[in-house]
Amino acid sequence: MPSTLLSRRDLDFLLHEWLRVSDLVGRPRYAEHSRETFDDALDLAEQVATERFAPHNRAADLAEPTFDGERVRLIPQVRAALDSFAETGLLAAGMDAAVGGLQLPHAVTAACFTWFQAANVATSAYPFLTLGNANLLLAHGSAEQVDTYVRPMLEGRFFGTMCLSEPHAGSSLADITTRAQEQPDGSYRLFGTKMWISGGDHELAENIVHLVLARIPGGPPGVKGISLFIVPKVLVGADGSLGDRNDVVLAGLNHKMGFRGTTNTLLSFGDGRHTPGGRAGAVGHLVGAPHQGLAQMFHMMNEARIAVGAGATALGYTGYLKSLAYARERPQGRPVDAKDPSAAQVPIIEHPDVRRMLLAQKSYVEGALALVLYCARLVDEEKTAEAEADRERAHLLLDVLTPIAKSWPSQWCLAANDLAIQVLGGAGYTRDHDVEQHYRDNRLNPIHEGTHGIQALDLLGRKVTMRGGAGLAVLTETIGDTVERARRAGGEPADLADRLAGAVERIVSVTRRLWADGDPVLALANASAYLEAVGHVVIAWMWLEQVLALPAEGGDAFHAGKRQAARYFFTVELPRTGPQFDLLDSRDRTTLDMRPDWF
């Protein structure tokens, strides 16, 4: 039976037939690899995700973590699954060989991790955060910090978190108040509270490495005065041994509608519950230079944003496959032109409206998967392209696509989950089937790692305008290259290319119109509509890219399904952008002029 987590055939198509990841083995970083090693990694990921992560997905949702005032308790299957994950070596699969990594391309490791997100997004959150933490320290930490904290994380012995938000500040990081007081030995003592910290406390590993944003007294106000600190749950000696319990404690668990198997915490730093060295204060170690914390943390946040988009895609994809399997098996009703009421009922997939819902899901989830893997391929270009100009171009394009890769799947793969429930009808609303949990889990992703609105402000306020519009230029030029290839191909690809080109022209003209007088308040008033419209154009581009990777003629049912999903997206979805661009072009003030006291 084919998997209902992800489609391996689709992954193979995207990685090998479209993105051609095997070409990367010609570069020094990946010279030890081949198509076979890539496929072996994907096989291993699918096996462990299927056998160790998927079976307890429902159990972890029903028996969410509890806290008795001393310890956090989770169902034992979580620890067993994470131990199995660590044994695979996939935690370090994309890392440098110097730290024990396998130096697999990021496109391959991203595809591997998507299996775990589809199988059990809550349990996969622990290694997800740990990988981001490790990558940040590899980029900004000292050699000693890498040896002390990164190596144990890549071995699965330590897990990691990111601690940004505070109860009074939320996403407004300029308002955080956690302070870090320098000590005579060069360490710091931290005092403050952090909220919404996923993986913030548990007993799934020997230690938890918190990366904490805090202020050093006397530093600049606002975000320019934020520094980044390593604050382990248990202090680590120079020889790697575990020492005193640090003064960071769990103040309480947050209970969410989804991701229930991931501990989500309120953490208190320096309240004196523990006294390392005989006094209160959470011992921390500065990462890099003072007052550079936000820039450093964005290394982890940008990586996390794309990974959130991948998780949203995975949840949408598994929901689609499960509703597809149900539609093939569930008999109900007869065709509208059936004359004999005593004839056997037909599977519901025979009904056009059910096929509409399945086709919409397919267009969303396969388009989103293409986008997140395309972004992962850009990471490989950014790291390993021979020419500096190519590396810089990949970096710039990835910057522009990041808010889209985070928010578009979070919005539209959630819509796919909604449709999956609808396909199952009343059964979809019950806990007898997984699709209702996938919806609840996915509902977090429009909020996770920066809300939809924050991503919209980032795209329109920064990314498309940066460096004199270079961000917008690299996006439209890259899409333009696809358009020209499709026009040369002729036939249906050329027709799709013309429609896509028209939408790209609207992006350019609307962006110029919004920023015509340089008023950011008016320009950004409808930023969310801009993000949604540009996101739809980008997914149309992803579909045209997939069409061009298909055989020019013929093919099998997989290829025919790809073509039909592309037609659906261009026919039904891309036209949605017209009214959105019209709204933006008018510089509409309806929302802006609504006064708070009128509600």
Image (cartoon, grey):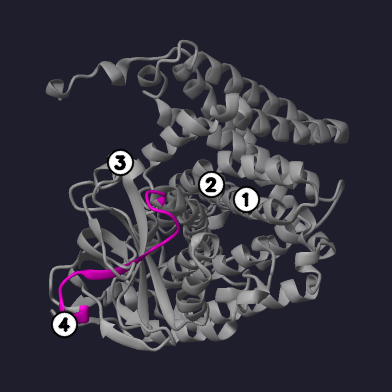
Q: Which is closer to the viewer, label 3 or label 4? A: 3
Q: Is residue 506 above or below residue 163?
A: above
Q: x%, y% of residue 14?
A: 71, 57
Q: CA distance from mark 4 to mark 2?
A: 39 Å
User: Which amino acid type is marked by label 2?
Assistant: Ala
Magenta region: which residues? 276-292
Assess whether mark 2 and mark 1 are in contact (beta carbons under 8 angstroms): yes
Q: Which is closer to the viewer, label 1 or label 3? A: 3
Residue bearing mark 1: 375
Q: Is residue 233 above or below residue 76?
A: above
User: Which amino acid type is marked by label 3?
Assistant: Pro
The residue closer to the viewer here, 90 or 98, is: 98
The mark that comes first in sequence, 1 or 2, is 1
Q: Along the horizontal axis of the image, is 262 left or right of 144?
A: left
Q: CA distance from mark 1 to mark 4?
A: 42 Å
Q: CA distance from mark 2 to mark 3?
A: 33 Å
The residue closer to the viewer here, 220 or 594, is: 220
- Tell me the SS state at disc 3: loop
Assess whether mark 3 and mark 2 are in contact (beta carbons under 8 angstroms): no
Task: Please name the residue shown 36% across and 80% down the image.
Answer: 207
